[in-house]
Image: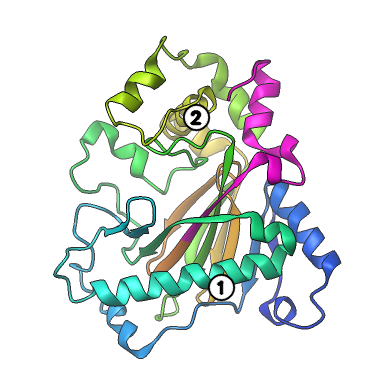
Amino acid sequence: MSEIVQIPASRFLSDSWSVQDQADAVEKLEGSNVIFIPGLSVAMKDDEQILFSQDRNLTDGVQKNITLDPYLGKTSGISKDSPYKAAAESLMARYKSETEGWLARLLGDPGRKYAAQRTTFRPVEIRNRKSIGKVGDEKQFRFDDTLLHADAFKRRPMVKRRILRVFNNINPFGEPRLWKVGGDFTDYAKRYVGKMRQPWPGEFTVLNALRLTHWKRSHYDHIMLNLHDMGKLDRDFQENSPQQQFAFPPNAVWLCFTDSVLHAALAGRYALEQTFEITIDDMRHPEKSPQRLLEKLTGKALC
Protein backbone atom coordinates (compact mmCIF):
# COMPACT_ATOMS: atom_id res chain seq x y z
CA MET A 1 0.00 0.00 0.00
CA SER A 2 1.34 3.45 -0.90
CA GLU A 3 1.78 5.70 2.13
CA ILE A 4 0.90 9.38 2.55
CA VAL A 5 4.13 10.91 3.89
CA GLN A 6 3.44 14.28 5.53
CA ILE A 7 6.03 17.07 5.64
CA PRO A 8 4.74 20.36 7.10
CA ALA A 9 5.55 23.40 4.98
CA SER A 10 7.14 25.09 8.00
CA ARG A 11 9.75 22.32 8.09
CA PHE A 12 10.15 22.04 4.34
CA LEU A 13 10.79 25.78 3.96
CA SER A 14 13.01 26.15 7.02
CA ASP A 15 16.80 26.37 7.15
CA SER A 16 16.81 23.01 8.92
CA TRP A 17 15.71 21.15 5.75
CA SER A 18 18.85 19.09 5.22
CA VAL A 19 20.66 16.93 2.69
CA GLN A 20 19.52 13.91 4.70
CA ASP A 21 15.91 15.11 4.50
CA GLN A 22 16.32 15.38 0.73
CA ALA A 23 17.74 11.86 0.50
CA ASP A 24 14.86 10.53 2.60
CA ALA A 25 12.35 12.29 0.32
CA VAL A 26 13.92 10.66 -2.75
CA GLU A 27 13.59 7.24 -1.10
CA LYS A 28 9.95 7.83 -0.20
CA LEU A 29 9.07 9.14 -3.65
CA GLU A 30 10.81 6.37 -5.59
CA GLY A 31 9.24 3.86 -3.21
CA SER A 32 5.82 4.74 -4.70
CA ASN A 33 4.58 6.85 -1.83
CA VAL A 34 2.77 10.20 -1.86
CA ILE A 35 4.57 13.19 -0.33
CA PHE A 36 2.06 15.60 1.22
CA ILE A 37 3.08 19.15 2.19
CA PRO A 38 0.24 20.99 3.98
CA GLY A 39 0.59 24.76 4.10
CA LEU A 40 2.39 25.05 0.76
CA SER A 41 0.67 26.72 -2.20
CA VAL A 42 1.27 28.95 -5.18
CA ALA A 43 0.28 32.56 -4.45
CA MET A 44 -2.72 33.89 -6.36
CA LYS A 45 -2.63 37.38 -7.91
CA ASP A 46 -5.60 39.73 -7.69
CA ASP A 47 -6.40 39.54 -11.39
CA GLU A 48 -6.45 35.72 -11.17
CA GLN A 49 -9.33 35.64 -8.68
CA ILE A 50 -11.63 35.66 -11.71
CA LEU A 51 -10.72 31.99 -12.12
CA PHE A 52 -12.77 31.22 -9.00
CA SER A 53 -15.93 32.66 -10.53
CA GLN A 54 -17.57 29.21 -10.52
CA ASP A 55 -18.63 29.98 -14.08
CA ARG A 56 -19.52 26.73 -15.86
CA ASN A 57 -18.10 28.21 -19.05
CA LEU A 58 -14.60 28.46 -17.62
CA THR A 59 -13.49 25.44 -19.69
CA ASP A 60 -14.47 24.85 -23.30
CA GLY A 61 -16.88 22.02 -22.47
CA VAL A 62 -14.84 19.55 -24.52
CA GLN A 63 -11.88 18.97 -22.20
CA LYS A 64 -12.04 18.55 -18.44
CA ASN A 65 -8.93 20.67 -17.73
CA ILE A 66 -7.19 23.75 -19.05
CA THR A 67 -3.74 22.67 -20.23
CA LEU A 68 -0.58 24.61 -21.05
CA ASP A 69 1.41 22.25 -23.29
CA PRO A 70 5.04 23.12 -24.13
CA TYR A 71 5.31 20.26 -26.65
CA LEU A 72 2.33 21.43 -28.71
CA GLY A 73 3.06 25.07 -27.94
CA LYS A 74 -0.50 25.99 -27.05
CA THR A 75 -3.16 26.21 -24.35
CA SER A 76 -6.13 23.89 -24.72
CA GLY A 77 -9.38 23.42 -22.85
CA ILE A 78 -10.35 27.09 -23.03
CA SER A 79 -11.59 29.18 -25.97
CA LYS A 80 -9.24 31.69 -27.57
CA ASP A 81 -11.57 34.60 -26.79
CA SER A 82 -12.31 33.57 -23.19
CA PRO A 83 -11.93 36.40 -20.63
CA TYR A 84 -10.25 33.84 -18.37
CA LYS A 85 -7.52 32.71 -20.77
CA ALA A 86 -4.82 35.25 -19.87
CA ALA A 87 -5.31 34.70 -16.12
CA ALA A 88 -5.20 30.92 -16.51
CA GLU A 89 -2.02 31.03 -18.60
CA SER A 90 -0.34 33.41 -16.16
CA LEU A 91 -1.21 31.19 -13.20
CA MET A 92 -0.07 27.99 -14.91
CA ALA A 93 3.23 29.49 -16.06
CA ARG A 94 3.98 30.67 -12.53
CA TYR A 95 2.97 27.33 -11.07
CA LYS A 96 5.41 25.55 -13.39
CA SER A 97 8.21 27.78 -12.12
CA GLU A 98 7.19 27.27 -8.48
CA THR A 99 7.09 23.48 -8.77
CA GLU A 100 10.54 23.38 -10.33
CA GLY A 101 11.84 25.23 -7.28
CA TRP A 102 9.93 22.98 -4.88
CA LEU A 103 11.38 19.84 -6.47
CA ALA A 104 14.93 21.17 -6.29
CA ARG A 105 14.46 22.03 -2.61
CA LEU A 106 12.64 18.82 -1.72
CA LEU A 107 15.02 16.39 -3.43
CA GLY A 108 18.28 18.31 -3.83
CA ASP A 109 20.34 17.61 -6.97
CA PRO A 110 18.07 14.73 -8.09
CA GLY A 111 15.19 17.21 -8.22
CA ARG A 112 16.94 19.14 -10.99
CA LYS A 113 16.87 16.11 -13.29
CA TYR A 114 13.11 16.30 -13.75
CA ALA A 115 11.91 17.92 -16.98
CA ALA A 116 8.70 19.96 -16.75
CA GLN A 117 5.99 18.99 -19.21
CA ARG A 118 2.28 19.91 -19.28
CA THR A 119 0.68 22.16 -16.69
CA THR A 120 -3.04 21.92 -15.96
CA PHE A 121 -5.61 24.00 -14.13
CA ARG A 122 -8.51 21.83 -12.95
CA PRO A 123 -11.49 24.03 -12.05
CA VAL A 124 -14.31 21.54 -12.67
CA GLU A 125 -15.84 19.54 -9.80
CA ILE A 126 -14.83 15.87 -10.06
CA ARG A 127 -17.76 14.40 -8.13
CA ASN A 128 -20.49 13.12 -10.48
CA ARG A 129 -18.46 14.12 -13.55
CA LYS A 130 -18.46 10.96 -15.66
CA SER A 131 -18.35 12.23 -19.22
CA ILE A 132 -16.40 14.78 -21.21
CA GLY A 133 -16.56 16.38 -24.61
CA LYS A 134 -16.82 14.37 -27.79
CA VAL A 135 -15.65 11.03 -26.40
CA GLY A 136 -18.01 8.15 -27.17
CA ASP A 137 -19.85 6.42 -24.34
CA GLU A 138 -17.81 3.23 -24.76
CA LYS A 139 -14.57 5.14 -24.07
CA GLN A 140 -15.72 7.44 -21.27
CA PHE A 141 -14.29 5.11 -18.61
CA ARG A 142 -10.78 6.04 -19.73
CA PHE A 143 -11.38 9.64 -18.60
CA ASP A 144 -13.16 8.81 -15.36
CA ASP A 145 -10.72 10.02 -12.69
CA THR A 146 -12.78 8.45 -9.90
CA LEU A 147 -11.61 4.97 -10.93
CA LEU A 148 -8.39 3.61 -9.42
CA HIS A 149 -5.57 3.51 -11.98
CA ALA A 150 -1.91 4.07 -12.82
CA ASP A 151 -1.24 6.77 -15.41
CA ALA A 152 -0.35 5.98 -19.02
CA PHE A 153 -0.53 8.32 -22.02
CA LYS A 154 -2.15 7.06 -25.21
CA ARG A 155 -0.60 9.63 -27.57
CA ARG A 156 2.58 10.30 -25.57
CA PRO A 157 4.56 7.07 -25.10
CA MET A 158 6.91 7.24 -22.11
CA VAL A 159 9.68 4.88 -23.42
CA LYS A 160 12.07 4.67 -20.44
CA ARG A 161 10.66 7.78 -18.76
CA ARG A 162 8.50 8.15 -15.66
CA ILE A 163 5.54 10.37 -14.79
CA LEU A 164 5.82 12.54 -11.68
CA ARG A 165 2.94 14.87 -10.92
CA VAL A 166 2.82 17.75 -8.44
CA PHE A 167 -0.67 18.80 -7.31
CA ASN A 168 -1.82 21.91 -5.46
CA ASN A 169 -5.31 22.42 -4.03
CA ILE A 170 -5.98 26.16 -4.49
CA ASN A 171 -9.71 25.95 -3.71
CA PRO A 172 -10.72 29.26 -2.04
CA PHE A 173 -13.94 27.87 -0.53
CA GLY A 174 -12.40 25.50 2.01
CA GLU A 175 -13.16 22.39 -0.05
CA PRO A 176 -10.69 19.46 0.07
CA ARG A 177 -9.62 17.36 -2.88
CA LEU A 178 -10.55 13.78 -2.08
CA TRP A 179 -8.26 11.05 -3.35
CA LYS A 180 -8.12 7.28 -3.18
CA VAL A 181 -4.67 5.65 -3.04
CA GLY A 182 -4.28 1.97 -3.85
CA GLY A 183 -2.02 -1.00 -3.28
CA ASP A 184 1.14 -2.51 -4.72
CA PHE A 185 1.89 -1.93 -8.41
CA THR A 186 3.31 -5.42 -8.99
CA ASP A 187 0.15 -7.03 -7.59
CA TYR A 188 -1.88 -4.78 -9.90
CA ALA A 189 0.21 -5.82 -12.90
CA LYS A 190 0.09 -9.54 -12.07
CA ARG A 191 -3.70 -9.35 -12.12
CA TYR A 192 -3.81 -8.42 -15.83
CA VAL A 193 -0.52 -9.04 -17.69
CA GLY A 194 -1.35 -12.61 -18.60
CA LYS A 195 -4.79 -11.60 -19.91
CA MET A 196 -3.87 -8.78 -22.28
CA ARG A 197 -3.28 -9.18 -26.01
CA GLN A 198 0.20 -9.01 -27.46
CA PRO A 199 0.92 -6.12 -29.85
CA TRP A 200 0.47 -6.89 -33.54
CA PRO A 201 3.57 -6.90 -35.78
CA GLY A 202 4.28 -3.34 -36.90
CA GLU A 203 1.50 -1.91 -34.70
CA PHE A 204 3.60 0.80 -33.08
CA THR A 205 5.07 1.95 -36.40
CA VAL A 206 1.62 2.22 -37.96
CA LEU A 207 0.21 4.18 -35.00
CA ASN A 208 3.03 6.68 -35.30
CA ALA A 209 2.73 6.92 -39.10
CA LEU A 210 -0.97 7.70 -38.71
CA ARG A 211 -0.06 10.36 -36.10
CA LEU A 212 -2.06 8.58 -33.43
CA THR A 213 1.04 8.79 -31.25
CA HIS A 214 3.48 11.71 -31.12
CA TRP A 215 6.40 9.28 -31.34
CA LYS A 216 6.78 5.51 -31.51
CA ARG A 217 5.14 3.52 -28.73
CA SER A 218 7.10 0.84 -26.85
CA HIS A 219 5.95 -2.56 -25.58
CA TYR A 220 6.16 -1.06 -22.09
CA ASP A 221 3.63 1.63 -23.07
CA HIS A 222 1.39 -1.04 -24.60
CA ILE A 223 1.29 -2.90 -21.28
CA MET A 224 0.74 0.26 -19.23
CA LEU A 225 -2.19 1.36 -21.41
CA ASN A 226 -3.77 -2.06 -21.07
CA LEU A 227 -3.26 -2.06 -17.29
CA HIS A 228 -4.95 1.35 -17.15
CA ASP A 229 -8.01 0.19 -19.09
CA MET A 230 -8.33 -3.29 -17.61
CA GLY A 231 -8.10 -1.99 -14.06
CA LYS A 232 -10.72 0.67 -14.64
CA LEU A 233 -13.11 -1.88 -16.14
CA ASP A 234 -12.62 -4.40 -13.31
CA ARG A 235 -15.35 -3.76 -10.74
CA ASP A 236 -13.91 -6.25 -8.26
CA PHE A 237 -10.54 -4.50 -8.38
CA GLN A 238 -12.17 -1.09 -7.96
CA GLU A 239 -14.23 -2.18 -4.96
CA ASN A 240 -12.10 -4.77 -3.18
CA SER A 241 -8.41 -4.11 -3.83
CA PRO A 242 -6.31 -2.48 -1.06
CA GLN A 243 -7.08 1.26 -0.92
CA GLN A 244 -7.46 4.23 1.37
CA GLN A 245 -9.10 7.63 1.03
CA PHE A 246 -7.36 10.88 1.88
CA ALA A 247 -8.61 14.48 1.77
CA PHE A 248 -5.98 17.02 0.67
CA PRO A 249 -6.99 20.38 2.17
CA PRO A 250 -6.77 23.77 0.45
CA ASN A 251 -3.31 25.31 0.39
CA ALA A 252 -1.59 21.94 0.25
CA VAL A 253 0.77 20.29 -2.22
CA TRP A 254 1.18 16.57 -2.86
CA LEU A 255 3.28 14.69 -5.38
CA CYS A 256 3.91 11.13 -6.50
CA PHE A 257 4.88 8.95 -9.42
CA THR A 258 1.41 8.48 -10.86
CA ASP A 259 2.61 5.67 -13.14
CA SER A 260 3.16 3.42 -10.10
CA VAL A 261 0.99 4.92 -7.34
CA LEU A 262 -2.52 3.62 -7.94
CA HIS A 263 -4.81 6.59 -7.44
CA ALA A 264 -8.23 8.07 -8.10
CA ALA A 265 -9.61 11.58 -7.63
CA LEU A 266 -13.09 11.40 -6.11
CA ALA A 267 -14.09 14.99 -5.43
CA GLY A 268 -12.80 18.54 -5.57
CA ARG A 269 -12.40 21.53 -7.85
CA TYR A 270 -9.84 24.31 -8.41
CA ALA A 271 -6.52 22.50 -8.39
CA LEU A 272 -3.25 22.82 -10.27
CA GLU A 273 -1.08 19.99 -11.57
CA GLN A 274 2.41 20.00 -13.04
CA THR A 275 3.71 16.95 -14.88
CA PHE A 276 7.42 16.13 -14.83
CA GLU A 277 9.34 13.37 -16.57
CA ILE A 278 12.58 11.67 -15.64
CA THR A 279 14.44 8.83 -17.36
CA ILE A 280 14.70 5.70 -15.25
CA ASP A 281 18.50 5.83 -15.55
CA ASP A 282 18.44 9.12 -13.62
CA MET A 283 16.60 7.54 -10.70
CA ARG A 284 18.36 6.37 -7.55
CA HIS A 285 16.42 3.10 -7.82
CA PRO A 286 15.64 2.25 -11.47
CA GLU A 287 14.64 -1.22 -10.29
CA LYS A 288 11.57 0.32 -8.61
CA SER A 289 10.25 1.82 -11.85
CA PRO A 290 7.18 0.23 -13.49
CA GLN A 291 9.28 -0.64 -16.53
CA ARG A 292 11.79 -2.67 -14.54
CA LEU A 293 9.03 -4.30 -12.46
CA LEU A 294 7.16 -5.30 -15.62
CA GLU A 295 10.35 -6.59 -17.25
CA LYS A 296 10.96 -8.75 -14.20
CA LEU A 297 7.38 -9.99 -14.38
CA THR A 298 7.37 -10.72 -18.12
CA GLY A 299 10.98 -11.87 -18.42
CA LYS A 300 11.72 -9.62 -21.40
CA ALA A 301 13.07 -6.17 -22.24
CA LEU A 302 10.15 -3.83 -22.96
CA CYS A 303 11.93 -0.79 -24.44
Q: Which range of residues does the magenta coloring cover?
A: 274-303
**Residue drawn where x is 60% and y is 31% of the image:** 188
Q: Is residue 186 left or right of residue 202?
A: right
**Residue drawn where x is 36% and y is 45% of the image:** 144
Residue beneath disc 2: 221
Q: Residues within 10 Å of mark 2 (few under 14, many from 20)?
A: many
Q: Does the magenta stretch include residue 283?
A: yes
* x then y, percent, for residue 248: 54, 67
- Looking at the rendered structure, the number of numbered marks drawn on it comes to 2
Q: What element carries label 1?
A: strand
Could you tell me which quadrant the C terminus lies in?
top right
* x then y, percent, for residue 82: 17, 71
Could you tell me which quadrant the N terminus lies in?
top right
Measure the C-alpha gap from mark 2 to mark 1: 31 Å
Q: Is residue 212 above or below residue 67?
A: above
Check the image and name the residue furthest to the top. Answer: 201
Q: In this view, does 209 lie to the left or right of 95?
A: left
Residue beneath disc 1: 252
For the residue pair 49 and 23, the one nearer the viewer reads as: 23
Q: Is residue 260 above or below residue 179?
A: above
Looking at marks 2 and 1 on the same chain, the residue that comes earlier in the sequence is marked by 2
* Quarter residue 118 falls in: bottom left
Amino acid on which disc 2 is placed = Asp
Q: Can residue 176 be seen in this view?
A: no
Amino acid on which disc 1 is placed = Ala
**Residue drawn where x is 56% and y is 15% of the image:** 194
Check the image and name the residue furthest to the bottom. Answer: 46
Q: In this view, does 209 lie to the left or right of 224?
A: left
For the residue pair 30 and 149, the one nearer the viewer reads as: 30
